[in-house]
Every structure is written in structure tokens, then in C-alpha cells.
Amino acid sequence: KEPKPAGNFKVCVCGGAGGIGQPLSLLMGMDPNVSELCIFDLNVAMVPPAGVATDLSHLERKCAVKGYVMEVGKNPIDYLEECLTGCHLVLVPAGVPRKPGMTRDDLFKTNAGIAKGIVEACAKFCPEAVLGMIVNPVNSVVPAMAELYKKKGLDPMKIVGITTLDVVRANKFVGEIAGKNPNYINIPVVGGHAGTTILPLFSQDKIGKTIEAEKIPDLDKHVQNAGTDVVEAKGGKGSATLSMAYAGARFGKSVLAGLSGRKRVECAYCKSEITDLPYFAQKVVFGEGGIVKVLPLGELNEHETKRLEEAKAQLKGEIESGLKYAESESLA
């Protein structure tokens, strides 16, 4: 069988000069499937996007890199035509990060507006692209944006919440306990992307299922609270940026592999019918065009079954916030 040639895909990172955006752009620029990388950010970013682009343009990769800047308060749809036209994948780590003591609701009000501006521009200039959303709170932002896409007559499955970091952490933590290489561990993490909505299915992995039952509740909590651990360890000066960039790039690589005809399975948060909730994170298959299949949850043990109900109860309200937002808004 002939090996398939590397793809030539255009990728844009919106928020590409920020704490997650810079390392995420670095990792995407190294992907052999990427031929064009666009770095978009605001004029208040840590460094100008053009600077990040020039820096990344020196890597020993085929990828051409270009930066795009916009003033705060302006509308992405008026500025991003060249940046987004022809994009296959748009990664969106834009938005304000969660500060200690901030509720996810405060965060949602601010970040939904930021996400909407970008999604609106994508709907116009690259409606076929996969949008990987890192904008928190993902549990509410993704339903809001997917419903706006649907209203506009576009495919809501193009709006995908990146929950890969939960999987990455679960794999790593299980590896630490079991003394095994996390590369050979694959814990599906389902539900949502915050607190109790994060449900790692340890029983579905050959190494995960060897961990003693009494250790599972703490391990479960460790995965749920890992983001807060980073916020605290950084003393309020930031949140998980490097591990998020690593996870975002893992997701991005899988999307591009799928687009080039090599199917990949990842957990992701999207419009879903596998539970009674309209949005859910579970295993999906990435292929040509993005998500080609949403996979069932599989068998859950007693602990996981109980936790699923708890996760769904919390997630339901967070989805509703997103749906409510979409009812009162529409894309230009």
C-alpha cells in the first residue's frame, strides 16, 4: 500500500500570540501536514502576531507563516478575509483566561462574545473548516457557537470543543501510578471539560483497569482538578498554557490526519446523540470533512455509571447557558 503523501493544509490560530497560542502555533508549525499557518491576535497581545509569525517562519519546516492583527473592539469579520480564506482548521485559544475566584458564568459572558466574533468570520470565509474551540468555558461556548452555525445553515459538527487535555492528564496520571509509559495508555474522558463534568473511564483501558478500586475516586478528582492545580502553582499568574498547547496540537494533528484520509479517534466535545444531552464529549472519528462518526460510550463500571449521572446533571445547566445565548444572537 502506497503511503499517503503529507497534506498541504492551511491552519489558523486565533489568539496565536497568547500564552496557549504561541506554543500551540509552534507545535502546529512543526506538523508535516501544515503548509500555511496564520497567527491572528489583537493589538493588546503579549507580542505582535507578526512577531510570532516571523519567529516561526525560521523553523526547518515547509510551512509558510503569516501574522494578522486587529484592534480591540473591532469586528473579526471585517479583518480576517485573507487570514481565514482557504483554512482547513481554525484553532481558537482566544478569550480571557480564568482568574482565581472567577465563576465560569462571568467567564462565559466575556468569552462568548469573543468566540462569536471569530466564529462569525469563519462562517463567512471558511465555512468548511473544522473549528477547534479552546475558549473557556467550553461546556457553554461550544453549544452556543454550534447552534449559531446551525442557524446560519452550516454544519454544527464543525464546531468542536477540545477536551484532549483531560485525556492527556488521565493518561499521564495513570502512567505515574502504574509505573507505565503514558504513550501506551488511552483513557477515554467523556462528559464535559470542567470540574465534575470531566469523567475519565479508567475501566476502558488495559492499564487503567488494573488500578485498585479504592484509588479511583482520588484519581478521578486529580484529573478534574488538574487545571486548578496549575492555576494555583502559577500563583494566579496564568493557567495551563503549555500542556493545553500540547493537547491542542494533538487534537489538531488528528484532525489534519483525518482530512488527509487517515482516520483518527480522539475524545471531543460536540453535538451528540449518545446521551439524552444535546452536547457531550466522547470518542469521535476524524476523517475527511472533520467528525465522520460519534462513537458510543461503551461499558461503564459501577463507579463510572454513578459519576455519569452526576456529570450530566452539572453539564445540563452549562449547555443550557450556551443554548440560551444562541437564541438571542445570530451570525452576520
Image: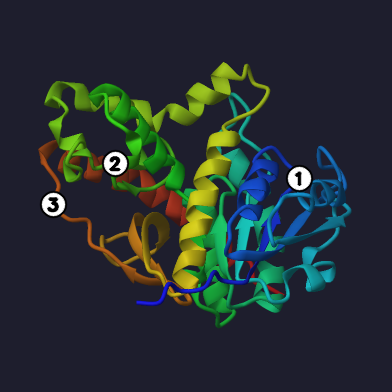
In the image, residue 323 sits, relative to residue 110, either above or below, namely: below
Q: Which mark is residue 184?
A: 2
Decide which of tag 2 and tag 1 comes sooner along the chain: 1
Residue 60 at what x, y percent from top left? 71, 52
Q: List the residue tagged with mark 3.
A: 299
**Which residue is at 70% across, 77% downward?**
124
Left/right placement of residue 90 relative to residue 195 reads right
Three-letter residue code for mark 3: Glu
Mark 1 crowd level (few <14, some 14–19, many ≥20, 10 Å Cα): many
In the image, residue 320 sits, relative to residue 311, either above or below, namely: below
Q: List the residue tagged with mark 1.
A: 17
Say what secondary structure mark 2 lies in. helix
Mark 2 crowd level (few <14, some 14–19, many ≥20, 10 Å Cα): few
Instruction: Tell whether label 3 touches label 2 (CB within 8 Å).
Output: no
**Which residue is at 56% across, 32% downward?**
240
Say what secondary structure mark 3 lies in. loop
Q: Quadrant of residue 73?
A: bottom right
Instruction: Tell whether label 1 touches label 2 (CB within 8 Å).
Output: no
Three-letter residue code for mark 1: Ala
Decide which of tag 2 and tag 3 comes sooner along the chain: 2
**Which residue in the rendered view is the most extreme toward the front?**
2
Residue 175 at what x, y percent from top left? 30, 29
Q: CA distance from mark 2 to mark 3?
A: 20 Å
Front: mark 2 or 1: 2
Three-letter residue code for mark 2: Tyr
